Amino acid sequence: MPPGGGGPMTDCEYSQISTHSSSPMESPHKKRKIAARRKWEVFPGRNKFFCNGRIMMARQTGVFYLTLVLILVTSGLFFAFDCPYLAVKITPAIPVVGGILFFFVMGTLLRTSFSDPGVLPRATPDEAADLERQIDIANGTSSGGYRPPPRTKEVIINGQTVKLKYCFTCKIFRPPRASHCSLCDNCVERFDHHCPWVGNCVGKRNYRFFYMFILSLSFLTVFIFAFVITHVILRSQQTGFLNALKDSPASVLEAVVCFFSVWSIVGLSGFHTYLISSNQTTNEDIKGSWSNKRGKENYNPYSYGNIFTNCCAALCGPISPSLIDRRGYIQPDTPQPAAPSNGITMYGATQSQTNMCDQDQCIQSTKFVLQAAATPLLQSEPSLTSDELHLPGKASLGTPCTSLTLGQPTPPSSMPNLSSEAALTDVLPLKEEHVGHQFLTPEEAPSPPQMLAAGSPLAHSRTMHTLGLASQDSLHEDSVRGLVKLSSV
Amino acid sequence: MATEVHNLQELRRSASLATKVFIQRDYSEGTICQFQTKFPPELDSRIERQLFEETVKTLNGFYAEAEKIGGSSYLEGCLACATAYFIFLCMETHYEKVLKKISRYIQEQNEKVFAPRGLLLTDPVERGMRVIEISIYEDRCSSGSSSSGSSSGSGSSSGGGGGAGTR
């Protein structure tokens, strides 16, 4: 069985392998050879990492560079051309205050852009399987409909009923106020919106930095605008208006930039001040989740009741640490578990098991799955054939923060997930009958992980089931030893 | 006698993992981190209800302390804001300090309470604060000779034996 494509694993692994073959996809051999990769290198979301995982941004950062350039250039021109005159004519406090504001703006901008907004890590395979099992129990295992019912859980928070939705990409029930960002392909806690101007999502962990950024930027913009106007007026008192403009052409540019920015930035600050004082996110406000229009009994369960507490909580509350541990090292594979008591749940469908397949068989089995999926189901094909779940709203980043179509992840993004999940969960039960004859195919079916990334825990269990046989005996011995030792405690 | 297994990593590797139980989050009080204290049926024969509930309640208490909004957290927040958040480069946040306390507590609980019963708690921080993962270990073959030390291990090893039989 010639394994598919070599790469760095051209050495002795090939000859040793009879029961399991290596595949180029993600091999445990690779992990041993390339010593200690960090977790950010295998992060599943669509993010860019810099400085060995210390900095985390969204994939599209073009608009962020524009923001940087605008701020740096305008401030630079202000300090270079207007400040000397103003410092002499009025007071040297002007460049000092301007400088402080500028550093604060840059600091908060970089903090917002580079930090983790509160990304929720995706569920481990064990968790996902456990959840699937519970959902099946709750819904009744009905493979009758073409689409399983939407997965929601209701919870009562402070007297208000809140629906928790199941995220098909991350395989978790989203905590309240969390949402899945379609641009970054991550679930983010207390998701506010995805801001292209800062090149990152705004969520629980960086909302205060974002707010401080727009607040200080509004002050800076107003400050620069005011003093540029003052500068031009003072000069024109001496030399006439047109001459004043000729003497300091930079002022014109600054005035124009500031004039157009002031409206949007100040408006945005005002809007977010309102949101903070009522403890809502942009997402909730746009959807009108807590507005009175939905019903007389509708109120915001997260609000603390008064504006002061809401503001303090949002701005001065504790900052939770990042949950995704970007700079941690990838742990060696978890040990293979004992045989599952029933074939349904799976444990430890680690990558070492998904790549225990032959490349050719992978391809064949994938074709089989696609064919099987194509026939009984209405909507399977587009979703199954896509490599990843191409979520809408990836493009058009020219819109500013206030336009929130980009940050509306939940309804559109869950749809393709839903249909592909439906396809898989409906296909696999059909194939369980064929286990006896087509020994390899159902097990190999989920093996190209990218293809069927929406997760087929059922099929994974089959793979693990048969391939775990060889390693069970060695574990047997070890486990006896282990428990004999334990008994001596 | 034989050396005791102090190292929990060795426990993970040498005993065989039978199943995992997940304690989900309890959102009834909002978005703060709390876990459900409902006793999972899989642990029924493994550990006393009281011990389990006490552990979860203590953990909940720690998380509540970490996320508490009060005088000290305001102070920390204002100080951080005043220094443009550069202070976090040298100082650990209150939350991080409590998280360290929590992992020490979990380590201690694992050693004293859970490992002797063939269970292992995973720190929720490693699972994105979504679940408390409890791994249930058992020795499949020693259904007869199951260690007298592991208190209620023998009761559920038949489940593992049954599972082995279906292969």
Image: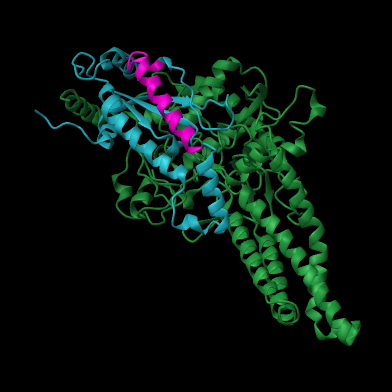
Chain colours: A green, B cyan
Is residue A443 shown to the viewer in this render?
A: no
Image spot of residue A269 (x, y percent): 74, 52
The residue lying toward the viewer, choosing from B27 and A247, is: A247
* Residue B120 in sight here: yes
Q: What secondary structure is the stretch in magenta mostly built from?
A: helix
User: Relative to residue A126, is residue A103 depicted above or below?
Assistant: below
Q: In the rendered view of the protein, which quadrant contains the C terminus of chain A?
A: top left
Of the pair A373 and B27, the residue shown nearer to us: B27
Q: Quadrant of the N terminus of chain A?
A: top left
Q: Which residues are magenta?
A: B42-67
- Picture residue at 70% right of the left edge, 49% below the top: A394
- Residue A386 relative to residue B106: left or right: right
Does B53 lie within the magenta span?
Answer: yes
Residue A436 x/y as whole percent:
44, 21
* Whether residue A275 is situated above or below residue B162 in the rendered picture: below
Q: Front-most of B115 and A378?
A: B115
